[in-house]
């Protein structure tokens, strides 16, 4: 496939940082620190993008809030994968009519996947006059420049030109926590599953160079992060666009070899190119979580083909078997779409039987949502929402039953967990994750956050395990 990979140069990024300095001076004349609210919808990639937005805002001297009343700038970083997420964003944007009335200087920005769709940008332009700035994922690296125009010239800016996509290094990040970190290794997607909008809004697959990724990973370990999740739309195709001869398994091994005590996770894997080498590497790398998020989407070969998933049910099941021979303790999770156009009762039953055969530790289930401009949007879709809901409910029930059974099997065992949060909810004040990524509620001192501990699992339910320190 030929497409244009654009490297954003160090000079271009440092120009953006100069603009941050100018904006800092611009706001310094006020008698209080300006505040920004960044609200993120959708996947982990978006969370990681919001860390860049906050990094830039931090460089401009902003503090942060989640209260739109007191925010000088509100940014919605949006998702386009399903209609529901879009409706929520539009609802939240609409609600700012009141805050902007009280504070006409408030700047409202909407960015991310939703606005990269021309019909959505148009909708914001025409029907949401309070929105000052709209930019797609391709322009995130030059957010300071776009923001400066809006803040100093007070006119609306819309920047959503379609592009294949770029790679920019050196954007400052302001991470949310101090225990868990996202580490993006690639951007975009080339797979064009027929239901999915992502390849249209995030552009073509492009990998960061191993040296840049390793530098960031080392910084994370040095800064004390204990849980690193490597991110990409399809990490299994990492490196295919690089001149260097490096694949995802090689990269995992290199990150694993960084000295330090941390857990290494990744998502998402496309089943069409998960390799035996990857499973073997996961098994051999002592820091690598034995967890695969391997979205199957459907259990019927007819539907998989119509989805353009490039694998069959049989190939998928073989892959799961192979992964489990390398890692008998593998935690397996998946995504499933119910009600893809034309999916029949029999075809749905094939999804259900696959789920019962694989027995996932956890599943993310969705009802098909029609996305403008995708091939599936043009397919006949004869079944009603009510009929799809019946299937969805049946699938959810199967998923919950299996999760509860899988969790039950942990009871009485001792697990090494990373204590990663103290949400203070009742007596189970701490949260932790097993190496495979299962949630554990436990009791203990907040100072334990960020440490590893041995925990005996005493109880469980569909969603989580409960344990006590040993
Ligand atoms: N409708 C419903 N679910 C979708 N997903 C992607 N596109 C759609 C859509 N149009 C789901 C897939 C994917 C997950 C991130 O979202 O299951 O793996
Ligand atoms: Fe969408 Fe398929 Fe790409 Fe995942 S692999 S982002 S489902 S097109």
Image (cartoon, helix red, strand yellow):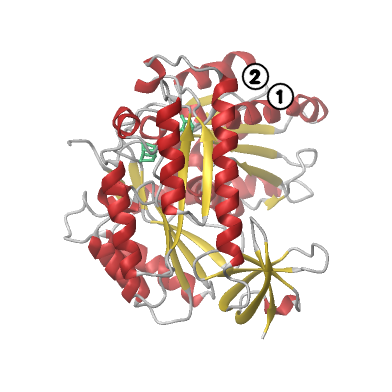
Tell me if residue 110 can be seen: yes
Query: First in sequence: mark 1 or mark 2?
Result: 1
In the visual, does 463 lie left or right of 212? right
Depth check, front residue: 321 or 416: 321
The location of residue 398, given as percent across then percent down, is 55, 45
Residue at image location 52% in from the left, 16% down from the top: 122
The location of residue 311, given as percent across then percent down, is 26, 41
Tell me if residue 139 can be seen: no
Depth check, front residue: 226 or 12: 226
Residue at image location 64% in from the left, 79% down from the top: 456
Which residue extends farthest bottom? 470
Mark 1 lies on a secondary structure that is: helix
Label 1 vs label 2: CA separation? Answer: 7 Å
Mark 2 lies on a secondary structure that is: loop
**390 over 177 or under it: above or below:** above
The C terminus: image quadrant = bottom right
The N terminus: image quadrant = top left
Depth check, front residue: 212 or 106: 212
The location of residue 374, given as percent across then percent down, is 38, 23
Residue at image location 17% in from the left, 36% down from the top: 2
**245 over 458 or under it: above or below:** above
**345 over 396 or under it: above or below:** above
Disc 1: CA contacts within 10 A as few (<14), some (14-19) or many (>=20): some
Q: Which mark is residue 128?
A: 2
Q: Which mark is residue 298?
A: none
Disc 2: CA contacts within 10 A as few (<14), some (14-19) or many (>=20): some
**Disc 2 residue: CB within 8 Å of ligand 1:** no
Looking at the image, do the residues carrying marks 1 and 2 touch, with CB atoms under 8 Å apart? yes
The location of residue 463, given as percent across then percent down, is 64, 56
Depth check, front residue: 356 or 407: 356
Q: Mark 1 highlights which residue?
A: 94
């Amino acid at each position: 496939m030929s497409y244009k990979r654009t490297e954003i140069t160090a000079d271009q990024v440092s120009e953006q940082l100069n603009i941050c300095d100018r904006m800092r001076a611009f706001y310094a004349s006020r008698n209080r620190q300006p505040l920004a609210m960044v609200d993120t919808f959708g996947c982990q990639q978006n969370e990681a993008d919001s860390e860049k937005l906050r990094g830039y805002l931090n460089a401009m001297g902003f503090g942060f809030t989640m209260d739109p009343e007191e925010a000088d700038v509100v940014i919605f970083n949006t998702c386009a994968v399903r209609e529901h997420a879009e409706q929520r964003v539009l609802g939240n944007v609409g609600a700012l009519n009141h805050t902007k009335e009280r504070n006409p200087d408030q700047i409202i920005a909407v960015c991310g996947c939703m606005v990269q769709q021309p019909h959505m940008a148009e909708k914001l332009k025409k029907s949401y006059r309070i929105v000052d700035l709209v930019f797609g994922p391709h322009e995130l690296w030059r957010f300071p420049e776009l923001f400066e125009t809006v803040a100093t010239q007070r006119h609306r800016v819309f920047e959503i030109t379609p592009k294949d996509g770029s790679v920019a290094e050196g954007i400052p990040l302001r991470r949310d926590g101090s225990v868990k970190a996202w580490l993006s290794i690639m951007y975009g997607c080339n797979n064009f599953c027929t239901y999915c909008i992502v390849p249209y809004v995030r552009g073509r697959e492009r990998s960061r160079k191993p040296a840049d990724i390793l530098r960031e990973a080392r910084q994370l370990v040095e800064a004390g992060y204990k849980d690193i999740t490597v991110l990409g739309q399809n990490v299994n195709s990492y490196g295919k666009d690089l001149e260097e001869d490096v694949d995802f398994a090689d990269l995992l091994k290199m990150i694993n070899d960084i000295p330090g005590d941390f857990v290494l996770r990744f998502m998402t894997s496309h089943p069409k190119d998960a390799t035996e080498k990857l499973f073997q590497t996961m098994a051999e790398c002592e820091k690598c979580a034995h967890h695969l998020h391997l979205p199957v989407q459907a259990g019927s070969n007819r539907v998989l083909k119509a989805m353009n998933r490039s694998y069959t049910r049989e190939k998928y099941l073989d892959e799961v078997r192979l992964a489990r021979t390398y890692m008998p303790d593998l935690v397996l999770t998946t995504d499933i779409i119910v009600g893809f156009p034309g999916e029949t009762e029999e075809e749905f039953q094939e999804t259900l039987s696959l789920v019962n055969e694989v027995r996932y530790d956890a599943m993310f289930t969705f009802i098909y949502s029609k996305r403008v401009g995708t091939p599936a949007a043009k397919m006949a879709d004869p079944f009603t929402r009510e009929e799809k809901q019946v299937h969805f409910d049946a699938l959810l029930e199967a998923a919950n039953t299996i999760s509860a059974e899988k969790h039950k099997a942990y009871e009485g065992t001792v697990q090494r967990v990373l204590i990663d949060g103290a949400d203070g909810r009742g007596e189970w004040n701490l949260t932790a994750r097993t190496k495979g990524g299962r949630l554990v509620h436990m009791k203990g001192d907040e100072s334990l956050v960020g440490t590893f501990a041995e925990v005996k699992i005493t109880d469980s339910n569909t969603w989580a395990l409960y344990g006590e320190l040993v």
